[in-house]
């Protein structure tokens, strides 16, 4: 399925908010080569767990553990809880505040003042009351701030999803890097065994007087130089194991038995479903989070503008007061008060003017950030597609190169046994085969990693 160039559509709320502020969100056409049917299929974006396409139960298990115990994920979940609480607090300001009070008061008046005519007096009474205070949100200032907190809460949800997408990609990348290193170690060990066999042949020929001591020294040099690569590769493998443990939120020793060296590097060369460009970018968590930030800042600007209008405040109290506790509940002891009021700030030294300017600048800044996030998303998808496509082509060529080098080594060794060629040809074939086998493993590992980066760039999988 092929699609023409699709423009990035804006969500209606953000588009209106941006238009009102005199700025426009980015709406550039997507690259035409995203429609390359040879390597990438255009279908509706799947929300499935893309890592299951590799059919690797070990990878599935690692991602499952990471999603439950990674500390960055747990921290993102706490951010959601905090943002939800902030939203509820903002909502609560639309409701009246009700207080209850009860008490007893005893007071004595001085008898040595003119006001009391030199007669001291004692007063005491019991009281209980319920008081209410409510700001009527006639012009919507409180509502707009509540809406802003809601958008920020939704942004933290998207940030959590972004953390999950990044975590899954990091686990898969580390896993395939580890598998690549294990495969490289297997290549080294296979070449060590092959070179040892050739070294034995050269030694036998030398002992029979059919080869020179130089041939023996050269064969041993190649053998031991290959052996020297094993400790460094083993250290690299241990580093990847430690990195995986951190991603999973566990200690490295807990990975024992999970990652066996004989497990082969998966091969994955086939067209990849990348999704409709417009849809795939809109589902990226970082883009959705940026949209929520724009909406939140637009609401805060609206609240700042509404702060210019009067505030309507209603306060009231109802209760009972009596000098005797037994008379407290009688109807004659009832007291009440209601006091609606309107306040309108006339002069604040430029505070509200500058608060509005600050809110407008914050909105404009978030729009610019959204545009940058969108461009960055396009770049990441472009880079991942290019790298994956080139790695596939490289893998195909390197496989043929490895096959030809195997044949070259076999032919040169046979000719050497017959005394028809120099040992240098065998040495060259040995070194070349080791190099191209290593290059092939690296290309296979890179293609898997680039594919993971592509899925991450598309924002899918969580």
Image (cartoon, grey):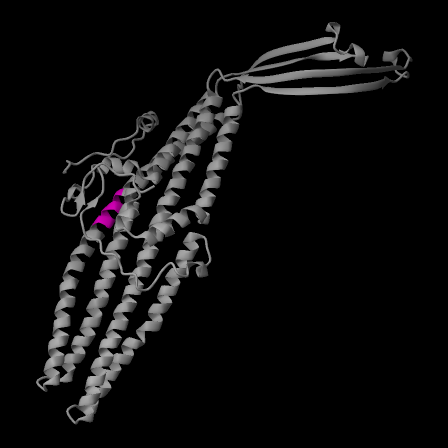
Q: Observer-nearest residue: 189 or 40? A: 189
Question: Can you say which quadrant of the picture contains the C terminus?
Answer: top left
Q: Observer-nearest residue: 213 or 198? A: 198
Question: Residue, x 32% and y 52% (percent of image)?
Answer: 57
Question: Residue, x 27% and y 76% (percent of image)?
Answer: 226
Question: Can you say which quadrant of the picture contains the N terminus?
Answer: top left
Question: Residue, x 66% and y 10% (percent of image)?
Answer: 337
Main secondary-structure element of the magenta-colored stretch? helix
Residue 428 is situated, as x and y percent measured from the top left of the image, at: 17, 77
Residue 39 in sight here: yes
Q: Observer-nearest residue: 247 or 386? A: 247
Residue 452 is situated, as x and y percent measured from the top left of the image, at: 28, 50
Q: Is residue 315 above or below residue 218?
A: above
Q: Is residue 322 above or below residue 452?
A: above
Residue 382 in magenta stretch? yes
Question: Residue, x 44% and y 29% (percent of image)?
Answer: 150
Q: Which residues are magenta?
A: 378-385
Q: How many marks?
A: 0
């Amino acid at each position: 399925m092929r699609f023409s160039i699709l423009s990035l559509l804006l969500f209606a709320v953000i588009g209106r908010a941006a238009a009102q502020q005199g700025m426009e969100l980015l709406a550039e056409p997507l690259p035409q080569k995203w429609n390359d049917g040879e390597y990438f299929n255009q279908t509706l974006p799947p929300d499935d767990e893309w890592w299951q396409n590799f059919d690797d139960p070990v990878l599935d298990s690692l991602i499952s553990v990471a999603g439950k115990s990674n500390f960055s994920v747990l921290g993102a979940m706490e951010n959601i809880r905090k943002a939800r609480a902030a939203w509820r607090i903002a909502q609560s300001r639309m409701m009246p505040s009700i207080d209850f009070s009860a008490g007893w008061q005893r007071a004595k008046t001085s008898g040595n003042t003119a006001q009391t005519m030199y007669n001291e007096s004692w007063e005491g009474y019991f009281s209980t009351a319920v008081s209410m205070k409510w700001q009527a949100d006639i012009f919507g200032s409180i509502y707009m701030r509540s809406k802003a907190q809601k958008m920020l809460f939704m942004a933290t949800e998207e940030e959590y999803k972004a953390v999950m997408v990044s975590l899954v990609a990091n686990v898969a990348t580390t896993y395939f890097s580890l598998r690549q290193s294990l495969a490289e170690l297997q290549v080294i060990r296979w070449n060590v065994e092959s070179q040892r066999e050739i070294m034995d042949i050269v030694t036998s020929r030398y002992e029979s007087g059919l080869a020179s001591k130089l041939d023996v020294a050269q064969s041993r040099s190649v053998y031991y130089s290959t052996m020297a690569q094993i400790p460094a590769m083993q250290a690299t493998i241990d580093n990847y194991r430690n990195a995986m443990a951190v991603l999973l939120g566990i200690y490295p020793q807990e990975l024992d038995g999970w990652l066996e060296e004989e497990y082969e590097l998966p091969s994955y060369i086939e067209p990849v479903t990348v999704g409709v460009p417009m849809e795939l970018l809109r589902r990226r968590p970082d883009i959705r989070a940026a949209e929520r930030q724009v909406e939140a800042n637009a609401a805060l600007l609206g609240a700042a503008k509404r702060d210019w209008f009067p505030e309507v405040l209603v306060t009231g109290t109802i209760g009972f007061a009596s000098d005797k506790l037994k008379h407290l509940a009688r109807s004659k002891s009832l007291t009440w008060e209601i006091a609606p009021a309107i306040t309108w700030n006339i002069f604040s030294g430029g505070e509200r003017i500058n608060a509005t300017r600050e809110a407008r600048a914050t909105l404009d800044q978030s729009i610019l950030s959204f545009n940058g996030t969108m461009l960055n998303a396009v770049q990441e998808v472009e880079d991942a597609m290019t790298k994956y496509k080139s790695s596939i082509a490289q893998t195909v060529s390197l496989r043929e190169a490895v096959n030809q080098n195997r044949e070259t080594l076999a032919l040169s060794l046979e000719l050497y046994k017959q005394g028809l060629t120099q040992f240098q040809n065998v040495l060259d074939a040995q070194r070349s085969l080791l190099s191209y086998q290593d290059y092939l493993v690296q290309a296979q590992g890179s293609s898997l990693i680039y594919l993971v980066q592509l899925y991450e760039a598309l924002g899918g999988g969580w």
